Image (cartoon, helix red, strand yellow):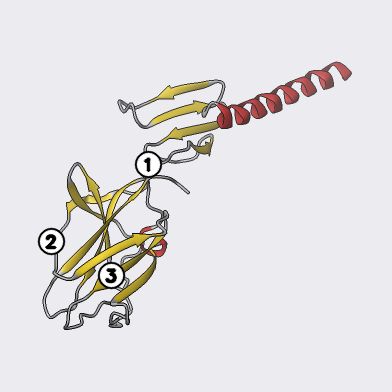
Amino acid sequence: MKKWLKITLWVVGGIILLFAIDLICIFTINRPLFAIKEDNGDSVNLIYRGLFYDTYNCHEFSVPQIKVKGAKYTCVVLEFDEQIESNYKPTEIENISTDIYDISLTGATIVIKDTNEKQNTYTDWYVIEKEENGNWYQLDTKVEDYGFNDIAYLPNENNEVKFVMDWEWLYGKLPLGSYRILKKVNDGSANIISIEFNIATTS
C-alpha cells in the first residue's frame, strides 16, 4: 500500500512540476517547454500547443495570448464585416483641423478646431474603420441596435470641440493596427471628416 502511495505521490508531483515548468516557460520563452508548433500556413500567427496551455502569438498583440488547454480561441479578434469596404468619403474642409491623443485599445480624445466664421455643429456620432493594404473597411459592432446622443455641440471660445471617446461598448478592444474615426460636420451638407490614428502597443 505504501509503495502505491509513493508512486501516486511521485506521479502527482511530476504533473505539478510539469505544470509549473510550462507556466514559467510561457512567461520566459513565450511558449510551453513541450509544445507542438502550428502556423496553419501563416508565419505571423503562430500557435504552440503544450501539455496544459496553448499560446497564440498573434500579430495583433505584442505579447502571447495564453489559453488553458482546449479553450476555443483564434488570433482573429476583430473581423471585418465580410470584408465590406467603407461607404464613407471624407473631405477636407477649410478652416477645420483635428488632433487625437490619449489613444488606448478602448478609447481616445479628439479635438476638432473650427475657425470658420459661420459656426458648424458636431454630435456624438462616429464610426471607426480599419485600414488594410491601403483600403478602409467597416468594423463589426458588438451591438446591433445602438444610437448616439443627438446633441449639437458648438466650438468653444477657443474654436474647439473636444470628445472624450470610449468605444469599448461598441467595438470592444481594438487590436494593433491603423484606424480612422469619422465625424460628421453639420454644416448643411453631408461632409465627413476623418481622424486617423494607430494603435502600436497593447498598453
Residue 184 image position (x, y, % from top left):
21, 71
The disc at residue 89 is: 2
| Image position of 125 (left or right of 45) | left
* Residue under the point 52% across and 29% down: 30
* Residue under the point 23% across and 48% down: 131
Confirm whether residue 52 shows in the render. no
Instruction: Report crowding for label 1: few under 14, some 14 to 19, many 20 or more residues within 10 A (C-alpha).
Output: many
* Residue under the point 36% across and 45% down: 176
Mark nearer the N terminus (1 vs 2)? 1
| Element type at mark 2 | loop
Identify which amino acid the numbered label 3 is placed on.
Ile
The residues tagged by marks 3 and 2 sit, at their Cα atoms, a distance apart of 18 Å
| Residue 183 in which image quadrant | bottom left
The disc at residue 130 is: none
* Residue under the point 19% across and 41% down: 133
The residue at which mark 3 appears reads as 112
Observer-nearest residue: 178 or 33? 178
Identify which amino acid the numbered label 2 is placed on.
Lys
Q: Decide: is 47 above or below 98.
A: above
| Image position of 152 (left or right of 136) | right
| Element type at mark 3 | strand
Residue 92 image position (x, y, % from top left):
14, 64
3 vs 2, front mark: 3
The residues tagged by marks 3 and 1 sit, at their Cα atoms, a distance apart of 29 Å
Observer-nearest residue: 3 or 156? 156
The disc at residue 60 is: 1
Residue 186 image position (x, y, % from top left):
19, 78
Look at the numbered discs 3 and 2 and tell me whether their residues touch, using CB distance below 8 Å: no
